[in-house]
Amino acid sequence: MDIYKKNVRTISFKITKIFLTFIFFLILLQPNIFSQANEINGICKLYDNKYIGKYFQSGYYYNPEDLVCSSRYYELYSLLIVENINNGKKTLVLVIDNSLPKEDEKDILLYLSKRAFVELSEIYSNILPAKVTLVKKLNKNEFENFLKNLNKSSQTEIQQKKEDSSNIDKTSKIYYIQVGVFSKEENYKNVQNHLISLGFNVIIKETTINNNKAYKVIIGPFDYDKISEILKIIQNLGYKDAFIIKSL
């Protein structure tokens, strides 16, 4: 009987150890639940109208005229600066939710309210490349007060010191990014469609490699002072061999 009890205790201990190990690795695989980066580059997308009036994790319902967003990278009640990499426009937003639609989890950094998106985008689209910076993690009372004050203003103005790169001559050369070269038409079209869905202007250039037809997938044009940020985003999307080119 003692041997039986000892075996049961041993098995129970092993099961508990396996369970705790599983929980530990689960936490490691989802670091964004417990920590957040100060600055991330990525793709931002406009909230679909179907979310209007829906209550989110913060207990706040979505109003398209408020400066708010959803993100799985930043905690609830975080205050963020979002900068459109294409045109340099900035706005403040508050995180009201940490969930994103399953189909968008891989590529989308933030879901933006209509008002936030319009403040950032010169051309009304549903997607844009952005640099997101954490300003402060607010508590619930700070969040509620800040939300009221933030949404009173008709247009958000963010005053920051300009970096040296902002002094670059506006007549500087235009650059492109070569995302990849593909020998099969099916492969380049898949990449082309993916990039177009993310809001990029895609150019296909035919070339020859070892006497065989191939296709260069290129995006652009971009200004000199934005090209490095765009390249980081493209590489983070999985196109590790992408590089900058000066002309087509």
Image (spheres, rainbow, N blue to C red):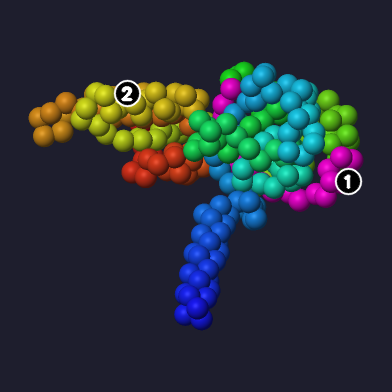
Up/down of 116 relative to 224, above or below: above
Q: Residue furthest left?
A: 211
Q: Residue furthest front?
A: 1
Residue 199: which numbered mark, if any?
none
Residue 141: which numbered mark, if any?
1
Q: Secondary structure at mark 1?
A: helix
Residue ID at (73%, 38%): 57
User: Residue type at mark 2?
Assistant: Lys
Q: Secondary structure at mark 2?
A: helix
Q: Nearer the viewer, residue 32 or 226?
A: 32
Whether residue 66 is visible to the viewer of this picture, yes or no, is yes
Query: Which quadrant would the C terminus be assigned to in this image?
Result: top left
For residue 180, side relative to residue 87 (left or right): left
Mark 2 neighbour class, 10 Å CA radius: few under 14, some 14 to 19, many 20 or more = some
The x, y position of residue 233, in whole percent, is: 48, 40
Magenta stretch, residue numbers:
126-145
The x, y position of residue 216, in whole percent, is: 28, 29
Q: Nearer the viewer, residue 9 or 131?
A: 9
Could you say which quadrant of the image residue 88 lies in? top right
Identify residue for label 2.
Answer: 189
User: Residue type at mark 1?
Assistant: Asn
- Tell us which disc is closer to us: 1 or 2: 1
Residue ID at (41%, 27%): 194
Q: Residue furthest bottom?
A: 2
Residue ID at (58%, 20%): 125
Residue ID at (39%, 23%): 193
